[in-house]
Image (cartoon, grey):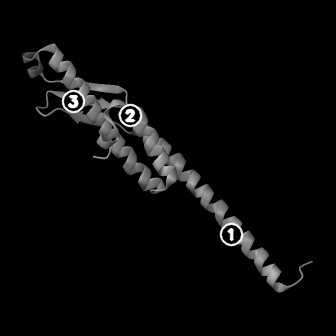
Amino acid sequence: MWADDAALDAAGRRLDEWESSLVERAARAARAKTLSARMQELTGTAHNNDRTVEVTVECSGLLIGLRLDERIRQQPAARTAQQILETTRAARTDLLRQVRELTVEFLGDDASGQAIIESYRSRLAGDQGSSDADR
């Protein structure tokens, strides 16, 4: 069936490469699945400079925790609202930092990993721009 040993060797190499490719894809899929599960567990937390406001956001960036120190009563409500918004942005930046670290750990710094990071950046950063996420 095979014309010569060279053709048989070439066919064997192609099969080995194909098998290796399938094994790598399966391993990458397993890493991606684990990454997804770990991402769901992430939270970002931040506090303002005087620690009167602390915010925690869950993996999609939604607020899940807000702690206000009693000292907050000594300032106008508008200032408190501004501090909550600023601290929420900082908590989202913290979350994005963790997303970046986890993605690079599981997938490396390739195009797929960068796409995941960019997706989170666009959802989380919104009005704060991409430079904040690089901190």
- Name the residue tied to disc 1: 17
Residue under pointer 2: 124
Q: Position of residue 87 (x, y in %)?
A: 23, 30
Q: Earlier in the sequence, mark 2 or mark 1?
A: 1
Type of amino acid at the residue the image marks with label 1: Glu
Residue 113 vertical position relative to residue 83 in the rendered view, above or below: below
Q: Is residue 54 left or right of residue 19?
A: left
Q: Which residue is mark 3?
A: 54
Mark before the other along the chain sequence, 2 or 3:
3
- The residue at 40%/49% (across/down) is 102
Identify the residue at image location x=43%, y=50%: 103
Query: Neighbour class for label 1 at 10 Å: few (<14), some, many (≥20)?
Result: few
Quarter holding the N terminus is bottom right
Report, in whole angstroms, how far the alpha carbon at label 2 lies from the one at label 3: 18 Å
- Element marked by disc 3: strand
- CA neighbours of label 2 inside 10 A, class few (<14), some (14 to 19), many (20+): many
Side of 91 relative to 78 (left or right): right
Instruction: Name the outermost residue toward the right.
Output: 1
Task: Point out which mark residue 28 bears.
Answer: none
Splitting the image into 4 quarters, where does residue 44 fall?
top left
- Quarter of the image for residue 61 reads top left
Q: Position of residue 27 (x, y in %)?
A: 58, 57
Q: Secondary structure at mark 2?
A: helix
Q: Mark 3 touching mark 1, by CB under 8 A?
A: no
**Amino acid type of the residue that numbered disc 2 sits on in the rendered structure:** Leu
